[in-house]
Image (spheres, grey):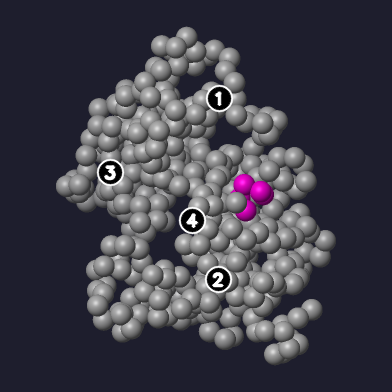
């Protein structure tokens, strides 16, 4: 096959994440790479993650350096490959960088465990410092609270406290990286335990509702405002013939196909949803029946927008303790059914869809490490739906027996 060059961009991490920091680059021009090989470590405002080679080939050019802060979509590296599926990325001349790209001189970064965080690193109310997710994780693993450490000066991108800054802090206090330290990890799990995401899939309904259509009810707002605040240009709404279970089934089948796993190999289903097709039995049980997994463990988890992360962590834990070997983690929501179209605070945010991942105890796939999960109960009432629970059934008792067991 003929070889050609492709330009790989800085990945997008979501509609509202516009920049990523290059923490570490593990390859050099001329290096031969294999698909799935870790070639860099990147950080968004919510996570630190591995960047893996998208295909087999060799590195021709690297367009950035460790410490650079780059917009999503900017050129990252050039690869020579024979993989025809990447023909659409074929290079032609020198790529154009965004004027928003900035650089911060940084010392070599020591590789560490990837951690997905549920919220962006923010200034601590006590120390006033901003920690990168990687540095905060290193502090917690050393038995320390980042919020009370005041002696550190950040030299990382944007003046944040980096992993290198924290290592120097440990060394200066007689607690070098190799010294035994207390740990906040009380799970008792082995560091050699591996849980991988072997496949992913998604599904969305047929109907599309654009910002322009929603704005008919909000003449004081513009499309530019909506995109700036939410990053959303359109959302999908299910019609009366579509269901959360149906969308979840499509997403799971795509994920199983990517993973190369038969549905009969699945041990369990964890469904993250706040609006299942019906309250009882669980949406996970309905999905198990639809997929033909009669005896799999199946349960729902309701943590609203963060439900996906909670479900992944629960699935990871179940595999690590031996309860299951292959799990489906899936989320499906038809939020259009409960969103007030006249409320300017929420009408633009929510739509319908499903996403699924196959977790396994095998080595193939993207590694899934433990997550640091937390919440702030002070903001309990920020977004709520009071109707439909035991305190306020919908409709009221006696209106229709269909709503009761």
Query: Which numbered mark, 2 or 3, is in the foreground of this view?
Result: 2
Q: Residue at x 62, y 47 (%)?
A: 313
Give the magenta part as a residue range.
311-315
Query: Which numbered mark, 4 or 1, is in the foreground of this view?
Result: 4
- Label 2 crowd (10 A; few <14 / some 14-19 / many >=20): few
Circle on res. 70: 3
Q: Is residue 291 magenta?
A: no
Q: Picture coordinates of residue 129 (x, y %)? A: 35, 32
Q: Picture coordinates of residue 97 (x, y %)? A: 20, 47
Q: Residue at x 58, y 81 (%)?
A: 242
Using residue 236 as the reference point, say whether residue 286 is left or right of it: right
Q: Which residue is mark 4?
A: 379
Q: Picture coordinates of residue 374 (x, y %)? A: 55, 45
Of helix, strand and loop, which mostly describes the magenta segment? helix
Q: Earlier in the sequence, mark 4 or mark 2?
A: 4
Using residue 173 as the reference point, say whether residue 107 is left or right of it: left
Q: Is residue 313 magenta?
A: yes
Secondary structure beneath label 3: strand
Tally the marks.
4
Q: Which residue is mark 1?
A: 143
Secondary structure beneath label 2: loop
Secondary structure beneath label 4: helix
Using the numbered discs, state the Cα–Cα distance from disc 4 to disc 2 in whole angstroms.
14 Å
Looking at the figure, which quarter contains the C terminus? bottom right
Q: Picture coordinates of residue 294 (x, y %)? A: 81, 65
Q: Which residue is mark 2?
A: 385
Q: Earlier in the sequence, mark 4 or mark 1?
A: 1
């Amino acid at each position: 096959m003929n070889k050609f060059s492709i330009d790989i961009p800085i990945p997008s991490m979501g509609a509202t994440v516009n920049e990523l920091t290059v923490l570490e680059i593990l390859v050099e021009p001329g290096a031969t790479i294999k698909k799935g090989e870790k070639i860099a470590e990147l950080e968004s405002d919510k996570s630190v993650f591995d960047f893996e080679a998208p295909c087999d080939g060799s590195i021709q050019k690297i367009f950035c350096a460790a410490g650079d802060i780059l917009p999503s979509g900017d050129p990252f590296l050039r690869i020579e490959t024979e993989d025809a599926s990447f023909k659409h990325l074929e290079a032609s001349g020198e790529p154009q960088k965004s004027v928003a790209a900035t650089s911060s001189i940084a010392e070599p970064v020591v590789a560490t465990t990837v951690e997905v965080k549920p919220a962006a690193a923010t200034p601590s109310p006590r120390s006033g410092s901003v920690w990168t997710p990687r540095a905060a994780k290193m502090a917690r693993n050393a038995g320390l609270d980042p919020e009370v450490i005041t002696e550190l000066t950040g030299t990382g991108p944007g003046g944040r406290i980096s992993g290198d800054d924290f290592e120097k802090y440990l060394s200066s206090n007689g607690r070098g990286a190799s010294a035994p330290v207390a740990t906040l990890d009380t799970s008792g799990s082995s560091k050699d335990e591996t849980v991988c995401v072997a496949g992913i899939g998604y599904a969305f309904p047929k109907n599309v509702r654009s910002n322009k259509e929603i704005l008919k009810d909000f003449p004081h707002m513009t499309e530019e405002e909506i995109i700036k605040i939410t990053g959303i240009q359109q959302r999908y709404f299910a019609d009366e013939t579509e269901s959360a279970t149906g969308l979840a089934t499509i997403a799971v089948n795509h994920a199983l196909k990517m993973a190369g796993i038969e549905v009969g190999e699945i041990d369990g289903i964890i469904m993250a949803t706040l609006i299942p097709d019906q309250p009882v039995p669980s949406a996970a049980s309905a999905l198990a029946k639809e997929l033909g997994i009669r005896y799999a463990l199946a349960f729902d988890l309701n943590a609203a927008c963060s439900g996906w992360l909670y479900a992944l962590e629960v699935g990871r834990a179940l595999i690590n303790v031996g309860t299951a070997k292959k799990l489906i983690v899936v989320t499906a929501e038809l939020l259009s059914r409960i969103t007030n179209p006249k409320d300017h605070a929420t009408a633009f945010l929510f739509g319908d869809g499903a996403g699924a991942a196959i977790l396994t105890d095998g080595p193939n796939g993207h590694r899934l490490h433990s997550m640091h999960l937390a919440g702030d109960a002070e903001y309990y009432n920020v977004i709520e739906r009071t109707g439909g629970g035991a305190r306020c059934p919908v409709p009221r008792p006696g209106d229709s027996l269909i709503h009761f067991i």
